[in-house]
Image (cartoon, rainbow, N blue to C red):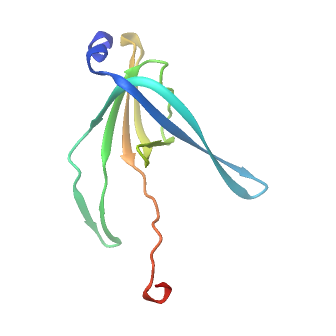
Amino acid sequence: MNTTLYGWEVPLTLERVIQDVNEGDLSTTTQTINFKGVWQPQKDEQLELKAEGQRSWEWIWIHAVSSTLNLETADKVIFNNKRYKVMLKKDYGLNNFVEYQLCRDYEETEVISDEDQ
């Protein structure tokens, strides 16, 4: 499988989101990760209708050579100005590659009321 990736992989850059709590305040920094891998949609993006509203989540697969991208489940990354959360990690160490499943992370958007305009 490792040699299969060589025909598909392209240079990619992710920003790993690192959050720390210092004296009760949340601080966020990012770490740039450059690697070669395959970024592809995992499944169709579908609208979910729920009591709290409707949402549409984007799911992504990443395949990379082992040790070039060291993410863990629940890590957050930014790619093309979109934030994703690592939902699943499969390490195929014997075959020298790793698979990640990411979901577009929820980001609050500022709602502008009629009074603010």
Asked if residue 98 can be seen in this view, the reply is: no
Q: Quadrant of the N terminus?
A: top left
Instruction: Kindly identify the residue that appears in the image at 27 percent across and 21 percent down.
Output: 8
Q: Nearer the viewer, residue 55 or 117?
A: 117
Q: Is residue 21 left or right of residue 77?
A: right
Indicate whether 73 appears above or below 110.
above
Q: Residue at x 44, y 18 (%)?
A: 66
Task: Place residue 64 in its image quadrant.
Answer: top left
Task: Looking at the picture, tell me which residue is in the foreground, 59 or 7.
Answer: 7
Q: Furthest-right residue in view?
A: 23
Q: Residue 49 at x, y = what percent?
A: 25, 67
- Judged from this view, the residue extending furthest toward the bottom is 115
Quarter of image, res 90: top left
Q: Residue furthest front?
A: 117
Q: Residue at x 39, y 11 (%)?
A: 94
Numbered circles on residues, count: 0
Residue 62, x across and y down, in percent: 35, 31
Question: Quadrant of residue 36 in the image?
Answer: top left
Residue at image position (42%, 52%) is 105
Q: Measured along the vertical axis of the image, is residue 65 above or below residue 85? A: above
- Residue 74 visible in the picture: yes
The percent coordinates of residue 61 (x first, y second) are 32, 35
Query: How far across and down, in percent of the image, does residue 27 sit?
Result: 68, 52
Residue 49 vs 14, above or below: the answer is: below
Apparent side of residue 28 relative to residue 44 in the rendered image (left or right): right
